[in-house]
Amino acid sequence: MNPLKKEGLDLAEFEASNCIDTIRPGTSGGLNVVYSKNGKRLSLNAAILTQLSNQSTVQIAYSENHIAIANYIGDKNTNYTLKQQGKNGAIYNAALVKEIIERYQLDFSNRTSLTFPVFEVQDKDDEMIVYINMRPVATQGD
């Protein structure tokens, strides 16, 4: 008997799934904030990394509604090490994640991650700066 061929099952006895196929909005990610008991990190996808000349460290700055990410923003800014994860880069820093969650009042009560798309890319003094809108009008991704 062929182990892939099973006798005795009749597909007519099966019920169809009643769930409706849902399609997520077509926004590509940029910054993914992960907050779970298994880890806290920021993940920067290829949309951000391709803008950076150095993919080993970044600096981060805040405004009321946006995060700026660049290789260099200023001398007073912290350099965060990026760990490569395929096409993405991750910053493993629980204090940074907590700071972002508190600053932008992000709600993780029923999810472990939120994804924010790239809002704008700007060239300033030969340095690419990626801006992420942390207060999007549309719903945030799961």
Image: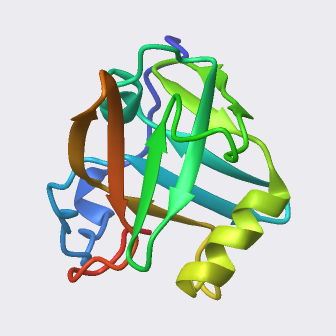
Q: In this view of the protein, which residue sits in the foreground, 17 or 27?
A: 27
Q: Looking at the rendering, which quadrant does residue 81 occupy? A: top right
Q: Where is residue 22 in the image (x, y as percent from the top left)?
A: 20, 68
Q: Is residue 2 left or right of residue 119?
A: right
Q: In this view of the protein, which residue sits in the foreground, 14 or 108?
A: 108
Q: Is residue 50 above or below residue 2?
A: below
- Write the residue at 70% across / 50% down: 41
Image quarter hosting the C terminus? bottom left
Q: Where is residue 47 in the image (x, y as percent from the top left)?
A: 30, 33
Q: Is residue 118 above or below residue 37?
A: above
Q: In this view of the protein, which residue sits in the foreground, 24 or 116?
A: 116
- Write the residue at 57% across / 87% down: 105
Q: How was this image coloured?
A: rainbow
Q: In this view, does 114 lie above or below 79?
A: below
Q: Position of residue 56 (x, y in %)?
A: 63, 18
- Write the residue at 34% across / 43% down: 130
- Write the residue at 51% across / 14% down: 54
Q: Position of residue 70 (x, y in %)?
A: 46, 36
Tally of numbered discs = 0
Q: In this view, does 10 lie to the left or right of 21?
A: right
